[in-house]
Image (cartoon, helix red, strand yellow):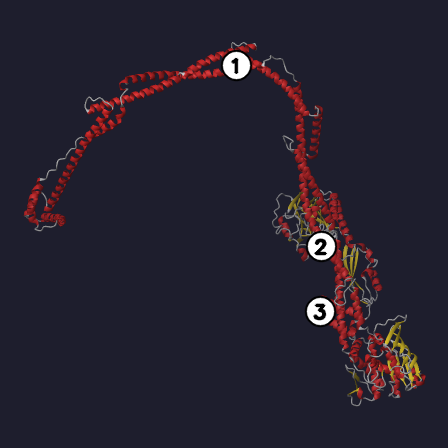
């Protein structure tokens, strides 16, 4: 028996930090990634497709998306088993209940771990129902001694996979408990980075969903032959997120920055890169950095290009602090505030105030950038 | 600003036009040439006269004293240029002390402010202190409150720096640009920040509404699912009912068809041939037969009853005979009056009772015991042997008892003693032994007992004698009563009373027996009469039976039925009746069938009914093929149509409800919009607002810091003046004075080289004071320039007390200052013009020619 396992597509999720329209584009790309997963199922002639939760986000999913998913799964024609996750939990009147599913699709019930026997193996699945999965769910499992291979389909956080504290809050479980219960393998969802450790398979999200989501993004091809279960992770993502820095020290004008930028933005596969570029260094006091303008034509080449202006203007603060005039006194006063700041925010505000005060004294047009 | 031209219509004795340079203009003239008037008219051009100057004192005011002497108009027109080189015209009519400010286009832009205040932002007093040197009363600049403020503000903006107000204003401009109010940093209603906040609020509201709509949608979807399930239930029930109805209708149609076919067949059957049985004959036969049958039944009963009572009649007749014999036998007693029988019987019974009791047996009186008789005689003797006392009767009894007891005990003791040892008897004892007793008391007891017995016997004998006497009188009374009774019933008188009474009682008993027999005889007679009645009935019935049989036979005969054997005739008759009934039944059946067929078919025909059956079967099979086997077996279709109609209505209602819910759900889902896009925009707005808020706070901090720094600097203007004095005083004083200090009140002190001590400038020589105060004014004017504008300096002969060397230094100083501002220098010294031209190229010179010139 061959299973294609995917999870965490997060269809229709919002993408904060993108320009208007980029979110819509990214959402379409997620659906395309979902289609690629199904295409892989066809290609590898699997017997079953399992979805380990968070197929979409309950509070954001659109009717058209739900219906499109149902349509695609219907077109696939293969048996599909869905275990809902914490983002697409199953509830009366919820999105899953409102969707008219084709006959080949089954959605695992909430509250009860249910066996779905297929030729060659049984898949046990349970859906999230808006609340935590039952405590000691796995400890209480008693698998029948029927000689079949049993596989667990669940949405939760295995201690074998990397996760942060937030991830760990969602049904953390020990792989050893899964094995002790008699499951040959756990097909899991929730962790967005693909992994196959200690019998727990996370395919990861088909596409990374933001900066900080590194690692592989796959579907898992699971081969069950008797009691032997083998797993192959197939990369499925097209896009990747990157964070970089560009040192703009010494630039006296936006034109110089643009030149620096042109030298930096030379990615051959820019269309697949979500790039967050941090501009750093000290620049001329009259150097105006408008990220939208500076990014210019590069924006179109990249999947997304976000410039973060972390440059600091050259305000000759040290020498001005020595002056006896108003600027000298202002610098000294605000430096004291910066040093005495009780919080990072206060310190940052005092630094900005220093920039603003000196720029105002200097008669500069731009006091601070807020756009 | 600087004064370009002055056209004086009349001021004191001065009039005419005067052109000035923007740098240095030297006004040369002798005494009374009008230098002071020109100097003052320049001041008045900017400030006019103050109210105090226009107030009369000692008959006139300063204002009046400055009026033209020759009656010309009291006024002037000054052409000035501001720091932006814009030209203005100041028109003064000092007579009315009215002024007009006209711009380059000729527009009157007067706003009530004095021109000097408008262009220089300082008052007349400060202008005169700082910008004017009056030859007459040269002194240090005095710090007035307004000048102090102006200096504080000015000192903050040292040369080359942007004024703090400008910087603050720039920050304020920035705050305005981001939509924050300058005064309290709140968002301006029409500003960018408010627009963003408003948009964020609208989006948040939109998102909240979308989330509410989504929550409603979930509820609605749940309701929709239930409604859909209910609708499907109705659908199933409807189809089940429909199929059941179709089946019931088909069954009904098939039955109707079968019935119709059967009716048609029955209607087609005709009646067969038969013998007529007239109704009259049938009725006659029926009546006769019924009568005969009834009689037969009655006869059976009568015969049975006659048989039963026949035996009883015999018994009754026998009993009658016996009773008659008994009555006859007792005929002699028929007339006995038995009314006294009971009385005589009771009296006789009492007599017999008395007789049975017999004569009372008198008991014999008991005989006395001879021993006791002897004792009675010897008692006293014996007692004398015993005791002399004579106790009372009671005491005696007690004593007797006591004695008896004692004696008994003594006797026992004695017997014991006797057994132990022989004793000798006493005389009493010997005597008692003769009586056979142990003591005298014993004899007394026995005597007493005997006395009581004899007394009792005597009392009984006396009672018996009384009773015997009563019996005898009662017997006499009863006999008399019997006798009277016998006489009353006229009983025979022969014999004694006993015989007569017995005879009467016997006769009255016989009389009673005879009367009982007569009563029984009468009862038997009635029973006998009654017992003989069935036989009479039976005979009557037999007669009626014969008549009825004849009548029946006659009736049968009318039907050609042999009536000899009535049973056979009856069979034949019944056969004829049944045959007739069958015939009639089949005829009526055919009619009914025809009618029923017509009713069944109504407007239809058998063929159309067959078509209906065919159609019904087709519909049923079609429904079953489409929906499966749903129909429930029912006998009748009654109510199914109504149920189906009700289901149709309810189903339609449910379909409408489902459709309505679905529409609502779709509408709600549309209303939820795209929350992801809204959230993205919200996040973007949050970020922008946060950046603006951050910038706002930073700028606020910057502004506050700038103002505080400026305030701090304001308090430090003296050092600026000190520095300037140190720089210029050393030069202008030829190196004599290099250290000078100005305090907060602008008082100047210099370090005297000889003593290195500080000395007030007021205490120095006139020339030195002139030098110090000139430098002080130049520096103050320089300090004020950035904030108050470049005011012209009007210096009336400041070098009067300078030597040549210092004069040159002074002119050089003025020449340098004239590069920054207009200086109009008044002097009597014509040579100064040449020197001024050396230190300041482009220096203008106005020569006033003296009084004649005016």
Q: Which mark is residue B208?
A: 2
Whole-percent x and y of residue B540?
Answer: 45, 14
Crowding at mark 1 (Cα within 10 Å: few <14, some 14-19, many 20+): many
* Residue B629 visible: no
Residue that badge 1 annotates: B288
Q: Is residue A80 above or below residue B314?
A: below
Marks 1 and 3 on same chain = no
Q: Quadrant of the N terminus of chain B?
A: bottom right
Whole-percent x and y of residue A350?
Answer: 74, 68
Marks 3 and 2 on same chain = no
Image quadrant in which you'd find residue B201: bottom right
* Residue B76 visible: yes
First along the sequence among labels 1 and 2: 2
Task: Check the residue under mark 1 and report the chain it is in.
Answer: B
Residue that badge 3 annotates: A341
For the residue pair B67 and B694, the one nearer the viewer reads as B67
Q: Is the C-beta separation of discs 1 and 3 under 8 Å?
A: no
Q: CA distance from mark 1 to mark 3?
A: 143 Å
Q: Is residue A122 above or below residue B63?
A: above
For the residue pair B751 and A130, the one nearer the viewer reads as B751
Q: Quadrant of the C terminus of chain B?
A: bottom right
Q: CA distance from mark 3 to mark 2?
A: 38 Å
Image quadrant in which you'd find residue B744: bottom right
């Amino acid at each position: 028996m061959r299973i294609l396992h995917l999870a965490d597509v997060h269809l229709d999720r919002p993408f904060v930090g993108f320009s208007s329209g980029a979110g819509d584009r990214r959402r379409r790309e997620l659906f395309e990634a979902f289609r690629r997963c199904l295409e892989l199922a066809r290609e590898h002639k699997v017997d079953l497709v399992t979805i380990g939760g968070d197929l979409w986000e309950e509070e954001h999913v659109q009717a058209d998306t739900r219906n499109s998913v149902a349509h695609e799964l219907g077109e696939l024609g293969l048996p599909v088993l869905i275990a809902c996750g914490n983002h697409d939990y199953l509830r009366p009147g919820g999105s899953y209940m409102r969707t008219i599913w084709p006959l080949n699709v089954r959605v695992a019930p909430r509250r009860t771990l249910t066996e779905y026997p297929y030729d060659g193996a049984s898949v046990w699945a349970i859906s999230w129902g808006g609340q935590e999965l039952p405590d000691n769910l796995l400890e209480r499992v008693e698998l029948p001694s029927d000689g079949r291979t049993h596989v667990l389909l669940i949405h939760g956080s295995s201690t074998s996979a990397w996760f942060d504290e937030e991830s760990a809050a969602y049904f953390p479980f020990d792989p050893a408990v899964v094995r002790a219960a008699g499951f040959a393998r756990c097909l899991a969802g929730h962790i967005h980075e693909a992994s196959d450790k200690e019998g727990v398979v996370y395919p990861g999200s088909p596409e990374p969903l933001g900066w900080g989501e590194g690692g592989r993004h796959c579907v898992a091809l699971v081969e069950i032959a008797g009691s032997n279960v083998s797993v192959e992770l197939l990369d499925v993502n097209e896009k990747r997120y990157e964070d970089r820095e560009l040192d703009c020290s010494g630039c006296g004008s936006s034109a110089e920055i643009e030149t620096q930028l042109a030298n930096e933005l030379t990615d051959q596969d820019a269309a697949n890169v979500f790039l967050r570029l941090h501009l750093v260094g000290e620049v001329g006091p009259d150097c105006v950095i408008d990220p939208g303008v500076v990014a210019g034509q590069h924006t179109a080449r990249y999947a997304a290009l976000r410039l973060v202006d972390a440059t600091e203007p050259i305000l000759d603060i040290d020498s001005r602090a020595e002056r006896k005039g108003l600027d000298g006194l202002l610098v000294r006063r605000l430096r004291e505030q910066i040093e005495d700041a009780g919080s990072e925010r206060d310190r940052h505000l005092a630094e900005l105030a220093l920039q603003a005060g000196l720029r105002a004294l200097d008669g500069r047009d731009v006091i601070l950038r807020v756009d | 600003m600087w004064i370009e031209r002055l056209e004086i219509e009349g001021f004191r004795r001065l009039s005419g036009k005067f052109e000035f340079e923007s740098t240095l203009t030297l006004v040369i003239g002798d005494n009374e040439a009008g230098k002071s008037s020109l100097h003052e008219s320049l001041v008045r051009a900017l400030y006019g006269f103050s109210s105090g100057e226009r107030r009369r004192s000692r008959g006139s005011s300063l204002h009046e004293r400055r009026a033209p002497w020759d009656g010309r108009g009291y006024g002037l027109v000054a052409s000035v240029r501001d720091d932006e080189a814009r030209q203005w015209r100041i028109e003064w009519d000092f007579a009315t002390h009215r002024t007009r400010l006209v711009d380059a286009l000729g527009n009157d832009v007067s706003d009530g402010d004095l021109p000097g205040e408008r262009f220089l932002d300082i008052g007349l007093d400060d202008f005169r202190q700082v910008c004017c040197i009056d030859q007459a009363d040269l002194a240090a600049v005095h710090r007035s409150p307004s000048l102090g403020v102006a200096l504080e503000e000015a000192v903050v903006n040292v040369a080359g720096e942007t004024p703090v107000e400008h910087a603050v204003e720039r920050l304020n401009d920035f705050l305005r640009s981001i939509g924050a109010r300058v005064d309290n940093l709140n968002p301006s209603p029409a500003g960018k920040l408010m627009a963003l906040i408003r948009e964020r609020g609208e989006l948040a509201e939109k998102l909240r509404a979308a989330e509410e709509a989504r929550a409603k949608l979930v509820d609605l979807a749940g309701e929709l699912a239930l409604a859909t399930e209910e609708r499907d239930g109705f659908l199933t029930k409807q189809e089940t009912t429909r199929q059941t109805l179709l089946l019931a209708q088909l069954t009904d149609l098939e039955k109707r068809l079968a019935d119709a076919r059967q009716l048609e067949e029955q209607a087609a059957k005709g009646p067969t041939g038969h013998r007529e049985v007239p109704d009259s004959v049938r009725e006659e036969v029926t009546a006769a037969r019924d009568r005969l049958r009834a009689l037969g039944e009655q006869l059976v009963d009568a015969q049975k009853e006659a048989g039963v009572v026949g035996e009883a009649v015999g018994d009754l007749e026998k009993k009658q005979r016996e009773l008659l014999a008994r009555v006859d036998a007792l005929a002699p007693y028929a007339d006995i009056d038995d009314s006294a029988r009971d009385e005589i019987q009771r009296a006789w019974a009492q007599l017999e009772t008395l007789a049975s009791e017999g004569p009372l047996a008198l008991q014999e009186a008991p005989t006395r015991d001879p021993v006791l008789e002897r004792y009675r005689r010897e008692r006293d003797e014996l007692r004398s042997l015993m005791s002399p006392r004579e106790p009372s009767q009671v005491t005696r009894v007690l004593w007797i008892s006591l004695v008896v007891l004692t004696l008994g005990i003594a006797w026992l003791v004695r017997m014991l003693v006797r057994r132990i040892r022989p004793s000798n008897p006493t005389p009493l004892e010997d005597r008692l032994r003769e009586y056979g007793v142990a003591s005298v008391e014993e004899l007394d007891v026995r005597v007493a007992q005997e006395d009581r017995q004899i007394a009792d016997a005597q009392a009984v004998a006396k009672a018996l004698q009384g009773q015997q006497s009563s019996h005898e009188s009662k017997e006499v009374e009863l006999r008399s009563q019997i006798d009277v009774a016998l006489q009353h019933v006229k009983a025979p008188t022969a014999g004694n009373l006993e015989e007569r009474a017995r005879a009467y009682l016997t006769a009255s008993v016989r009389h009673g027996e005879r009367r009982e027999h007569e009563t029984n005889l009468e009862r038997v007679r009635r029973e006998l009469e009654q017992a003989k009645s069935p036989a009479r009935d039976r005979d009557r019935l037999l007669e009626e039976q014969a008549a009825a049989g004849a009548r029946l036979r006659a009736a049968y005969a009318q039907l050609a039925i042999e009536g000899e054997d009535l049973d056979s005739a009856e069979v034949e008759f019944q056969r004829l009746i049944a045959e007739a009934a069958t015939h009639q039944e089949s005829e009526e059946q055919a009619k009914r069938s025809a009618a029923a067929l017509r009713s069944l078919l109504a407007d239809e025909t058998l063929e159309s009914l067959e078509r209906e059956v065919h159609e019904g079967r087709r519909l049923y099979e079609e429904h079953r093929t489409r929906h499966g086997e749903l129909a429930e077996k029912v006998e009748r279709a009654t109510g199914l149509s109504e149920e189906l109609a009700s289901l149709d209505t309810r189903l339609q209602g449910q379909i409408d409800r489902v459709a309505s819910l679905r529409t609502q759900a779709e509408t709600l889902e549309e209303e939820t919009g795209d929350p992801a896009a809204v959230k993205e925009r919200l996040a973007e707005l949050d970020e922008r607002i946060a950046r603006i808020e951050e910038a706002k706070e930073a700028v606020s901090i910057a502004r506050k810091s700038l103002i505080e720094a400026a305030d701090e600097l304001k308090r430090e203007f003296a050092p600026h003046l000190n520095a300037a004095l140190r720089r210029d005083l050393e030069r202008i004083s030829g190196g004599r004075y290099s250290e000078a200090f100005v305090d907060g009140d602008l008082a100047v002190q210099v370090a005297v080289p000889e003593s290195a001590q500080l000395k007030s400038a007021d205490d120095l020589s006139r020339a030195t004071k002139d030098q110090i105060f000139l430098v002080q004014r130049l520096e103050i004017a320089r300090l004020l320039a950035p904030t108050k504008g470049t005011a012209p300096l009007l210096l009336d002969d400041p070098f009067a007390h300078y030597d040549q060397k210092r004069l040159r230094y002074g002119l050089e100083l003025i020449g340098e200052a004239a590069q920054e501002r207009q200086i109009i220098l008044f002097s009597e010294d014509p040579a100064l013009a040449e020197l001024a031209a050396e230190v300041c190229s482009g220096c203008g010179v106005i020569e006033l020619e003296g009084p004649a010139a005016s």
